[in-house]
Amino acid sequence: MGQLEEPPEDAPQYSCFEAAREAGVLSETNAAQLCQGARSDAPAKCFQRVQEEGFLSEPQALQLCQYAQPSDDPASCFLKARKSSFLDETQLLLLCRPLIADQMNLYPYGL
């Protein structure tokens, strides 16, 4: 049997996965789902922040943070909008999640 190779140090999905696992708030399965298609560890950081400050359920936090990039910062969007609006959580998730998340739901096999 062949030996498993270590993932490259610069693999963004793997660094996200490791960050999510180290935070200890997700199962490995959910960490893998969160970090699918990640370009950095931003989804893991988003998830951890929303779980600490936002009181979202795990599925809601996954929905908000999957595909997050440092430039999006969906956690800040959600937390600010929650304090300053009367929208319910479902509407806030739709408002703040990265645009790519909607595109992936429409075109799961790419554009």
Image (cartoon, rainbow, N blue to C red):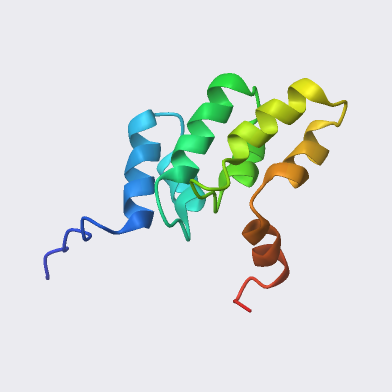
- Give x and y (percent) for residue 97: 67, 47
**Residue at position x 64%, y 39% from top?**
59
Vertical order, 67 against 83 (above or below): below
Name the one closer to the observer, 74 or 101: 74
Q: Residue furthest right?
A: 86
**Residue at position x 73%, y 69% from top?**
106
The quadrant of the rendering that contains the C terminus is bottom right
- Give x and y (percent) for residue 26: 46, 35
* Residue 98 shows in this picture: yes
Q: Is residue 4 left or right of residue 19?
A: left
- Give x and y (percent) for residue 58: 60, 34
**Residue at position x 67%, y 57% from top?**
99
Vertical order, 3 against 32 (above or below): below
**Residue at position x 49%, y 30% from top?**
48
Q: Is residue 61 left or right of residue 34?
A: right
Residue 12 picture quarter: bottom left
* Residue 58 shows in this picture: no
The quadrant of the rendering that contains the N terminus is bottom left
Q: Is residue 97 left or right of residue 40?
A: right
Give the mark count.
0
Vertical order, 4 against 42 (above or below): below
